Image: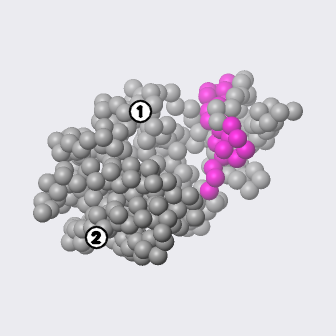
Amino acid sequence: MDETMRDLELGKQLMAENYPHLQLTNIEIIQGGGIKTVWKVETTEGIFCLKRIRKSLPIVKFTTSAQAYLSSKGALVAAIIPTKDNNLYFVHEGYALVLYSWIEGTDLDMEKNQEHLEIGLKGLAQFHKDTVGFVPPPDCETYNRMGVWPDNFKKMLEELKQWKSVSEQQNTPFHQAYLSIADEVIEMAEKSVQLLDRSCYHEWVKEIGEYGYMCHQDYGKGNALHTKEGVYVLDLDNLAYDIPLRDVRKLIFKRMAELESWDLNLVEHLINCYASVLPLTEEQRKIIYIDLLFPHKFYGYVKKPFKKGEDGEIRKLLKTFNVEKDKMPVLRQLLQLN
C-alpha cells in the first residue's frame, strides 16, 4: 500500500474512532506528508477539515481553547467539532488532531494584490478585536509576547554586533560582505531600540492588561479567506498574546518588498485600512514605523549562517540588505529622523 492510501485509511480510521456520529461519504488528502497530512472529510452532516497539529499538547490546549472561544462569540474562525468524548482534540501517536468546519472562500494574496491586502488588513483588525478577553485554561502553556519587544530588539541588536566581531576574524567572502554592510544594519537596529524605549509601548502594554489582544503570527496567503460574511482567519496554531501590530508590520513590509519601492502615502493608507476597524492613536501608529525600521528580515536571514551553521549566500545577503535599505527614505520621513 502506498503512502497516500495509508494516509486515506488512517483518516477513515481516526474519523470512525473519534467522530462515530459523523457518517463519512468521502475523504481526500489536501496536504500530504507524514505528520503534515490534512484531510478534507465529507459527511452527511457537512464538510470538515481534519488536521494534525505539530505543537506540544499544552500549547494545543491553549490554541484550541482560544479558537473555541472566538467561534462561540461569532468571530470569523473555523468552528471546532468536538470528539465523541466532547473534547476539542484527540491524540494519535503523540500528536493532537482537530476537526474543523470547512470554510469556502477566496484566498487573499496580500503580497501581490493591493485590494486583497486592504480587505485582509480590515479582517485582521476585526480578528484582533475579537481575541480580547480570552482567559486560557489553567493547565495549558501560552505563547505570550506581551511586553517583550524591547528585550527582543536588544537581543537581536547584540547578535548583529557579535556577528560583526565574528566577521572581523574571518576572511571568507561571505563574512567580508557582512562586514561591509553591518554598520548600516546595526544603526537601523539601534535607532529602533532607542525609539521603542521612548514610545508609548510600555504604557500601552500596561493599559491592555493580562488577557488582551492575540496576534496570529503567520497571517497571510492560505490563512485568510474572503467570504460573503467577511474574512475568515485560519490556522491559529501560533496564537500569542501581544500588542496587535506585529501582524500589521509583517504584511506592510512584505507588500513593499514585493513592489520593490516604498511609498509613504501607501504605507499610511494601509495602516488607515487597519485602523478603520481597530482605531490607533498617533503614538500607537508610530510603533508600526519603529517595528518596520528594525531590520527583521535581514536578521532572519543572517541568523541562519551565524546561529544555525547553514551556508551563507552573498547574493541573498545583499538582496536582503537592499530590501532593508529601500525602506529608509520613507521611514526617515515618518519617524522624523535626520
Give me the residue at 70% from left, 41% from top. Answer: 33
Instruction: Give above or below for 313 relative to 16.
Output: below
For disc 2, the marked residue is 190
Q: Position of residue 337 (x, y in %)?
A: 14, 62
The location of residue 254, given as percent across then percent down, is 36, 44
Mark 1 is on which residue type?
Answer: Leu
Judge from the rendering whether residue 102 lies leftward or rightward of residue 33; answer left or right. left
Q: What amino acid is labelled 2 in the image?
A: Glu
Write the start and end of the magenta stretch as one range. Answer: 32-55
Residue 163 place in picture, x, y as percent: 44, 71
Residue sitting at 56 percent across and 32 percent down?
A: 102
Relative placement, left or right, of 275 versus 31 is left
Residue assigned mark 1: 108
Instruction: Name the residue at 45% across, 54% down.
Output: 314
User: Is residue 36 covered in magenta?
Assistant: yes
Mark 2, other Cα within 10 Å: few <14 / some 14–19 / many ≥20: some
Label placed on residue 201? none
Q: Is residue 211 visible?
A: no
Q: Is residue 329 left or right of residue 242?
A: left
Q: Quadrant of residue 158?
A: bottom left
